[in-house]
Image: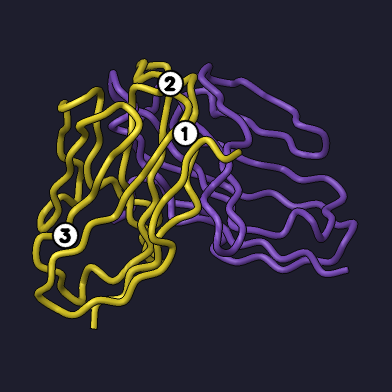
Chain colours: A purple, B yellow
Amino acid sequence: TQLLEQSPQFLSIQEGENLTVYCNSSSVFSSLQWYRQEPGEGPVLLVTVVTGGEVKKLKRLTFQFGDARKDSSLHITAAQPGDTGLYLCAGGRGYNNNDMRFGAGTRLTVKP
Amino acid sequence: DAGITQSPRHKVTETGTPVTLRCHQTENHRYMYWYRQDPGHGLRLIHYSYGVKDTDKGEVSDGYSVSRSKTEDFLLTLESATSSQTSVYFCAISESGSWSGAYGYTFGSGTRLTVV
């Protein structure tokens, strides 16, 4: 079983729509990161959140860390085709990043 | 000018043969990791290194070994390749292993390995 559950698995929307993807766990994390991965490439870090309730904005992307540090969400406003990709969340639990666990990802397609 | 490169990018090998994948970094980061990515499983940690000659196992380490003789190079060896090791392998680097996770990972572009 996946320590971090991401939903939905797949999402296909039209350009201009808003969307939210979720990352949930029964475990508490010291930090949570979001990555975006494009076909044939490695994941690229978007953001790190470390404080319960923290909200970070990156242009049209809004990231939130749950108050209990067990879950996170990524909201995209006015999605564009360039947002297409696999979105991965990753949670850190231990004293070292060796204990970073990844979710299976949400594959987003934004149609023009 | 990539700070992390993996080689080869693609490899097909036969069951039972040893295979070595290479990760090279130019960032002088202390931490290096090997992950495998499979559909429905996300990224799973195989082994990691926290310094030259300092390595430890991840959650899916069986059948794999690693070596780090220089800061910049981290090698992953499949001792006797099996079909279940067909996967995409990613190397990642990080400045620190601090508990806060404030330092994200930088990933390489991956090696697609097929064991036939």
Other residues around mark 3 within 10 Å, as few (<14) / some (14–19) / many (≥20): some
Mark 3 falls on what kind of element? strand
Instruction: Identify the chain of the residue marked 1, using the numbered disc in the image.
Output: B
Which quadrant of the rendered structure holds the N terminus of chain A?
Answer: bottom left
The residue at which mark 2 appears reads as B95
Alpha carbons under labels 1 and 3: distance apart:
23 Å
In the rendered image, residue A9, in percent from the top left (x then y), is placed at 54, 63
In the rendered image, residue A82, in percent from the top left (x then y), is placed at 79, 56
Quarter of image, res A11: bottom right
Mark 1 falls on what kind of element? loop
Quarter of image, res A80: bottom right
Mark 2 falls on what kind of element? loop
Q: Residue furthest bottom?
A: B116
Alpha carbons under labels 3 and 2: distance apart:
26 Å
Quarter of image, res B68: top left
| Residue A87 shown left or right of residue A29 in the figure | right
In the rendered image, residue A35, in percent from the top left (x then y), is placed at 56, 43
Query: Which residue appears at 21% of the width and 24% of the height?
Result: B52
| Residue A66 shown left or right of residue B94 in the figure | right
In the depicted view, which residue is nearer to us: B97 or A57? B97
The residue at which mark 3 appears reads as B78
The residue at which mark 1 appears reads as B105
